[in-house]
Image (spheres, rainbow, N blue to C red):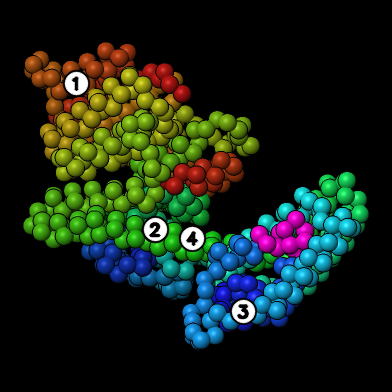
Amino acid sequence: MKTVRVLIVDDHRLFRSGVRAELGPSIQVVGEAEDVESAVATIAELEPDVVLLDVHMPGGGGVEVLRRVLGSGAQVRFLALSVSDAAEDVIGVIRGGARGYVTKTISGAELTDAISRVADGDAVFSPRLAGFVLDAFASTEAPPIDPELDSLTQREREVLRLIARGYAYKEIAKELFISVKTVETHVSSVLRKLQLSNRHELSRWATARRLV
Amino acid sequence: MLRPRAGRVVAGVAQGAAAQLRLDPVVLRLAFVLLTILDGVGVVAYAALWMFTATEQQEHPDRAGSRDWGQVAAYGLLGFAFGALALVSGAAAGGLAMWPIAVGGIGSLILWQQAEPGRRQKWMTSTVGRVRATWVRSGIGLLLVGVGVVGFLAAQDQLAQASTGLVFTAVVLGGVALIAAPWLAGLWRELQKERTERIRQEERAEVAAHVHDSVLHTLTLIQRAAHDPREVTRLARSQERDLRNWLYMPKQDADATLAAAVRRAAAEEEDAHGVPIEIVCVGDCDLDDGLRAMVHASRQAMVNAAKYSESPVVSVYLEVEPDEATVFVRDRGKGFVLDDVPDDRMGIRQSIIGRMERFGGTGRVKTAPGEGTEIMLTMKRTTG
């Protein structure tokens, strides 16, 4: 397994060094940045595989970094990392282009696993994010504008439910009698819908529901 | 306003008021006399001001009692003459029309002279400043006053129609109101500003109190418990939850909805057993007896997982669908063989499965040694 080159973007120095110490040997931390400006500059300079991105930072936060880096067409993958569980933060950063969202209470082993997954182009959903998505796509008030993007398939729903119940991808695969690769495909598909859907409830829902 | 003792004609009211308004006392004396002709308003006003005004401290005791009786007689005669004239011309019966002006005038005079000198100064400067700043408004106001006065005088010739007089009195008052509006608005704004500032200060005090009572307190406890990682985690998580609730959650009754009740159960068991309980809720609904039983059953499942499974973390997932609600309580602990659990152990069979079935729900246990345990509870919904 090749090592994954990671950049840590967070405005708390203590947290950056804590993450650095916790990550497994398959991860190589190539740099750190502490605000939007230095993050954009460092990403352009170091071209890491994965950026661990804090949601709340001086100068516009993680969403601003995503907008500027992905707007320039760079091929960098982002994993959002935050203390906030607020729906508008979670949904905001995912719709901004992050490949996953985990909270800062995550263990070092789980974080290492999540980074590898994002580096492989897959999506990482925490139980809480899965809950948000189920909630956001659950309301049936308005008919979907684009049925392909604006609703989840039965299988995707099952996968998300299992994630929300605390199942790891491997356990989900076993439970549903499918391969881990298929689980990953379903999650990536949900991520795409979350990012591209114009489902008008999504933003309103996230704003109305500040926290779980 | 003070009534001077020296140089007074009757009680020094006119002189005092004149000094206050920087007018010649003669003008005010004449005004009182003229007002007296109209239904005796002048006398009432004089008496009222007399009552509400303090006497000036005596500086020159020797001049104290000196009253110019000649002037008293002159004003008396003047009043008498005007009174006779008014009686002959019929103007004295201005009647009702005069009262609003009289009451308003006396009222404002009393207010004016009761106010602190400093505040009066402020009223004056702010009013003058705004009047200058809004010439148009003042112009319209003055025009209205003028029209009102002219109309009032015209109405005097048609005494039978006192109502017309009233209308014009209203016009006069409208004009006065228009002139006074900017000042009143300024006063209101100042009041609002003060109020906002006070609310902000109270909020700041509340935040400080909360941080002090909870966060600082917990940090102290964490330092004292530094040797016990489990206790530190428990304290930190408990405080985190508390702070999040305080910051983001609308104040809600934990017993009102299903999600709130399950969250509270999870929080309490996490505190009691020191094992993190991660909770995810999708949807929500009001509680009924069946759902309340489900909350109790899920609490029992959480207790079992926290106490016996040796799992580092417990996951709770609540999903509310249109016709039913489901709770999953899962741990990655050591698991067990369900059939090996003795019948007399109340936990799983009675407190969880039995309780669910009594209320028409179901409880299922999925477990195997080394595989962890998941308990799934389902209950039909009867509430909206």
Circle 1: residue type: Ser
Q: Quadrant of residue B127?
A: bottom right
Mark 2 belongs to which subunit? Answer: B
Mark 3 vs 4, N-terminal side: 3
Q: Are marks 1 and 2 in contact (CB under 8 Å)?
A: no
Frontmost of labels 1 and 4 is 4
Decide which of tag 1 and tag 2 comes sooner along the chain.
2
Of marks 3 and 1, which one's residue comes earlier in the chain?
A: 3
Q: Which residue is mark 4?
A: B195
- Report the Cα–Cα distance between label 3 and label 4: 51 Å
Discs 3, 4: same chain? yes
Q: What is the number of the mark on residue B67?
A: 3
- Mark 3 vs 4: CB contact within 8 A: no
Q: Is residue A38 above or below residue B162?
A: below
Local packing at callout 2 (Cα closer than 10 Å; few below 14, some 14-19, many 20+) is few
Mark 1 vs mark 2, foreground winner is 2
Q: Indicate left or right for B50 with B61 as reference.
A: right
CA distance for labels 1 and 2: 45 Å
Q: Amino acid at mark 4?
A: Arg
- SS of the residue under disc 4: helix
**Identity of the residue drawn at 50% across and 47% down:** A207
Q: Where does label 1 land, which residue?
A: B351
- What amino acid type is highlighted by mark number 2? Glu
Judged by depth in the image, the label closer to the viewer, 3 or 4, is: 3
- The residue at which mark 2 appears reads as B203
Q: Element under label 2?
A: helix
Q: Label 3: chain? A: B
Disc 1: which chain? B
- Is residue B147 on the magenta stretch? no
- The amino acid at mark 3 is Arg
Can residue B380 be seen at all in this image of the molecule? yes
